[in-house]
Image (spheres, rainbow, N blue to C red):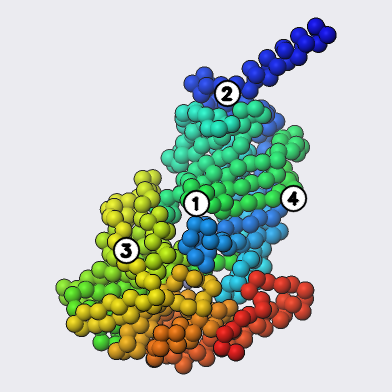
Amino acid sequence: MALLRKIKIISLFFILINSIPVSAQMMSAESVLEEAAEAMGGIDRIRNIDTLMMTGFSQTLNQDGGSGPSSHPKAPLKLAVQNGVERYFDLNNLRAYQTHRQGFLFPFALAFGHAWAPSSQIQEGVNALNHPVAALRAAFEESAQLGSVSIEDDNIVVQFTLADNTVLWLGINQLNKLPAWVRWMGPHANLGQVTYTSWFTGYLPFDGIRLPSGFTTEIDWRENVVAVFHVDSYEIDVALPEFVASGGGFGGGGNSGVAVTEVADGVWDLRVGTNGGAVVEFEDHLLMFEAYGNEANSLARIDRANTLVPGKEVTQVILSHHHFDHSGGIRAAISRGLTIITKRENEGMLREMASRPAPNFPDALARNPQPLDFMPVDEHLVLEDATRRVDVYEVVGHMHMTDAVFAYIPEERILMQGDMFDIGWDWHWWGGNYLDSVEHFDLEPEIDIPVHGRVSTLQEVVSNIESQVAAARDFCARDLAVGVYMAGCPVKYSRD
Ligand SMILES: [Zn+2]
């Protein structure tokens, strides 16, 4: 008995010793990384792998969580799905390549969003390093600078800097010594900059090396999980395909100049590519509808607008709704001191966007910090002076965007809107919202100036909505016939 008790006490002693966190100062970055390599199968095994391929399926958070129906932090979010994923790592060049078929788990207005068409991405720089083998290989590069060692929760954290000055952090689990996560930062149009942490879970042995079977990536905004990846299989030293990017997206985001069209006296349409919106002249200033896309496109529209009328500048921007493509230029607009006019419910998200620093990737707002100047809209806000009246109204009946506004110039009968209607859409899942909103506020528009597409007549708007609703219903019927049932089906249309 005495011996058994002694063994138990000794065992307990060793368990305690082993579970006491070691202090970070005791460890060199190199020794921590070497221990991690050892735990995975040895530094030689890691160095000897040329290529790695993993298959599986993933889900990604649409617009990093910036595309929910409402901007509320607890609003339901929208997911995209990638099936049939093959992700290849070229470990000698630290590049990666992914092919998959993608679909959206929410009703999307463009057919590519539900087509499950193959697409492929080339992942370079830090985007190729969110795998423990790739991250360790990057840290062991001759040109990498190993930095400080610290402790975070259960993990020893090693900072390292790549030859191009990219900084990463690798978290190593203190107990099993396996890499627990890798962290890096990137620029973000809406949030200034974002810190990403990819967690590695469920390690299993494959051909002499332990590899994770699960990946979860979160960002430092609302603790949103922006990607999860379920591994189905690993293959080591496979032949690499040619890395060719293709398919699946909104097309290029380049700034191709601002096209200006005068729609009425003192009302212009300013567009970069197919996206933009109205600029409206008041007695002593200009009002712009939407700061769409990104900083470059929004500043280009603002700068062009400021040349339209001598002595008058854009001082106010209407934000139709918070979705991250529509609010991509909001930080730029704030940097110019513009007043942001939108639904009152969006104030919280706007304050989050406006207050985030971006020291590593300084955008216009980081270079010229300005406080948010916010003008809330409830049901109806009138902007009026001696020369002009613009009414701003809440959008009704639109489940795509429940904290949305549109604007109306009663004198010229011009309606300005984002996502209530887009002549380029294949399908309209919420077709009733346009005329429901018009009738709710007893308006009589003749001309539509949209964020997406082109200036249209009301007749064009109404007939295109009818055909887009019919096309969405055809899509649901085709899917149903083959046993598939998508979100958004059956299509509800209040004007049947
Ligand atoms: Zn849109």
Three-letter residue code for mark 4: Asp
Q: First in sequence, mark 1 or 4: give its number.
A: 1
- Of the numbered discs in the image, which one, if any, rests on residue 232? 4
Q: Which residue is drawn at 70% across and 40% down?
A: 202
Q: First in sequence, mark 4 or 2: give its number.
A: 2
> Percent from the top left, x then y, of residue 139?
54, 34
- Of the numbered discs in the image, which one, if any, rests on residue 143? none
> Percent from the top left, x then y, of residue 288?
31, 73
Residue at far bottom of view: 459
Residue, disc 2: 21
Q: Is mark 4 within 8 Å of ligand 1?
A: no
Q: First in sequence, mark 3 or 2: give its number.
A: 2
The secondary structure type at the circle numbered 2 is loop
> Percent from the top left, x then y, of residue 423?
49, 82
The secondary structure type at the circle numbered 4 is strand
Residue 139 versus residue 440: which sits nearer the camera?
Answer: 440
Marks 3 and 1 close (CB-CB < 8 Å)? no
Residue 255 versus residue 318: which sits nearer the camera?
Answer: 318
The secondary structure type at the circle numbered 3 is strand
Q: In which quarter of the image is residue 17?
A: top right
Above or below residue 322? Residue 146 is above
Marks 4 and 2 close (CB-CB < 8 Å)? no
Three-letter residue code for mark 3: Phe
Q: Residues within 10 Å of mark 3 (few under 14, many from 20)?
A: many
- Of the numbered discs in the image, which one, if any, rests on residue 222? 1
The image quadrant where one finds the C terminus is: bottom right
Residue 113 relative to residue 186: left or right: right
Q: Is mark 1 within 8 Å of ligand 1?
A: no
* Front of the two marks 4 and 2: 2
The secondary structure type at the circle numbered 1 is loop
Three-letter residue code for mark 1: Arg
